Every structure is written in structure tokens, then in C-alpha cells.
Amino acid sequence: MHFVTVCIILLLSVFFCFVTGDDLTNCMKACHIEYEPVCATITNNEGKSFECSFINECFLEEFMCVKDIKDLEKKPDACSEDPPECIDIVKDALVGTDDNEFVPIVTP
């Protein structure tokens, strides 16, 4: 399951590089594709929290930049489980849609 999620995130990230407009230029990074997973807690606009795995810290930072999130609760390694919502959360951010707004869980 984690491998499939990582592959989808990677493909969407490549797609993101070709699709985004100039307004997100500051968010685009040359992220390495080494699998060093990071688990981040993301809360949607309905207040529901999800733990989602990102391929590495760079991809998480790119997601945070696109969504203008300053801080997230995160931990090293892949999350114990990636719910289906994670694919949509990451996909929406990487292709630049605003259908879903996400707010961070700020760490103290």
C-alpha cells in the first residue's frame, strides 16, 4: 500500500512541475526521489484529521508551500496506515486545485 501511494505521489509531483502556473513557482523544488518517508497529520475543512505519508521531507514541504501551511505535526517513517483520503489530499495540492482547503495541526 505504501509503495503504491509513493508511486502516485511521485507521478503527481512530476505532473505538478508541468501544470502549475507562475503563482506557485516559489513552491516548486527539485526534490530527490529517495524514499525517506515522513508521516504528517493534515486536517480538512470539516475538522477531520488524516495521517498521510509523503515520500520524503522535500515533498511534504512542497505540499505545505502549495497549501500555505506553516507547520504540521509530523514524524519520521511512513504512517501506520494511509487512508484513501490521503491520495486526494496530496493530488489536489500537487495539481493546484482548491476544491479542498486544509489547515495544519500546529505542533507546540
Image (cartoon, grey):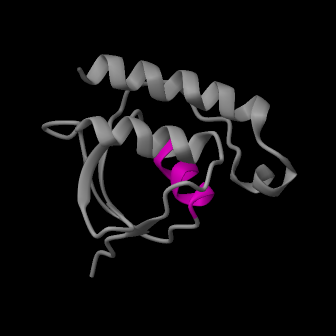
- The relative height of residue 81 versus residue 102 in the rendered view (above or below) is above
Q: Is residue 102 left or right of residue 19?
A: left
Q: Which residues are magenta?
A: 59-67
Q: Quadrant of the N terminus?
A: top left
In this picture, residue 84 sits left or right of residue 31: left
- Front-most of residues 36 and 105: 105
Going 13% across and 38% down the picture, which residue do you hit? 80
Which residue is situated farthest in the bottom direction here? Answer: 108
Q: Is residue 101 magenta?
A: no
Judge left or right: residue 53 versus residue 31. Answer: left
Q: Position of residue 68 (x, y in %)?
A: 58, 67
Magenta residue check for 65: yes
Looking at the image, which residue sits at the far left? 80
Name the residue: 69% across, 52% down: 27
State the count of labels: 0
Q: Nearer the viewer, residue 60 or 20?
A: 20
Question: Residue placed at 39% from the left, 25% from the top?
Answer: 6
Q: Residue at x 63, y 49 (%)?
A: 97
* For residue 83, side relative to residue 33 (left or right): left
Looking at the rendering, in which quadrant would you find the C terminus? Answer: bottom left
Q: Main secondary structure of the magenta part?
A: helix
Coordinates of residue 29 in the picture (x, y in percent): 68, 42
Position of residue 26 measured from the top left corner of the image (x, y, whole percent): 76, 55
User: Which residue is more in the foreground, 32 or 8?
Assistant: 8
Q: In the rendered image, which quarter is residue 28 located in? A: top right
Residue 71 sits in which quadrant? bottom left
Task: Work out whether residue 46 or residue 11 is closer to the camera in this orientation and state it.
Answer: 46
